[in-house]
Amino acid sequence: METNNPNVFSNNEITVTYKPHVCIHAERCARELSNVFRDSVIPWIDLDGASTKKIINQIKKCPSGALDYCLNKKEAC
């Protein structure tokens, strides 16, 4: 699913939002799950790079809370 917001990334299962003004650039996401959170490629989040479960677990580790998610079929985003 495409969006006009460059900080919203979505597929059939999950929608991930990124708040750049909150991010402290700890780069934990890119170091620990680099197939999804890529620092040198645009778009920098590739939801096909790992399972939804792995993506959710990594988002929960974000120290600043700049990354968030919702499941498309179970929650309203």
Image (cartoon, helix red, strand yellow):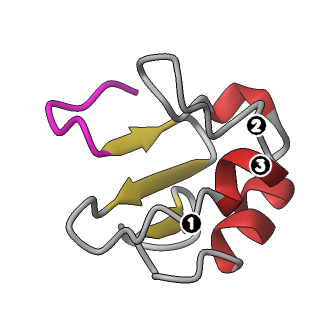
User: Which residue position holds label 1?
Assistant: 26
- Reply yes or no: does residue 5 show up in magenta: yes
Picture residue at 80% right of the left edge, 46% below the top: 33
Mark 1 or 2, closer to the camera: 1
Q: Nearer the viewer, mark 2 or mark 3?
A: 3
The percent coordinates of residue 76 (x first, y second) are 38, 71
C-alpha distance separating marks 2 and 3: 6 Å
Residue found 46% across the figure and 39% down from its top: 10
Q: Residue 31, labelled with which disc?
A: 3
| Residue receiving disc 2 | 34
N-terminal label among 1 and 2: 1
Lateral position of residue 13 relative to residue 49, left or right: left
Q: Nearer the viewer, residue 10 or 23?
A: 23
Q: Earlier in the sequence, mark 1 or mark 3?
A: 1
* Type of amino acid at the residue the image marks with label 2: Ser
Q: What's under tag 3, amino acid-wise?
A: Arg
For badge 1, the amino acid type reads: Ala
Tell me whether circle 1 and circle 3 mark residues in contact (CB < 8 Å): no
Q: Is residue 51 above or below residue 66?
A: above
Task: Find the residue positioned furthest to the top.
Answer: 41
- Residue 62 placement, left or right of 53: left
For the image, the number of numbered tags is: 3
Estimate the spatial distance between the alpha carbons at disc 1 and disc 2, rounded to whole Å. 14 Å
Spatial distance from mark 1 to mark 3, Cα to Cα?
Answer: 9 Å
Most common secondary structure along the magenta stretch: loop
Q: Secondary structure at mark 1?
A: loop
Extent of the magenta region: 1-7
Q: Position of residue 36 (x, y in %)?
A: 69, 36
The reply to whether the C-beta atoms of the residues labelled 2 and 3 are less than 8 Å apart is yes
Q: Decide if residue 49 is on the left or right side of residue 10.
A: right
Q: Residues within 10 Å of mark 2 (few under 14, many from 20)?
A: some
SS for dot 3 = helix
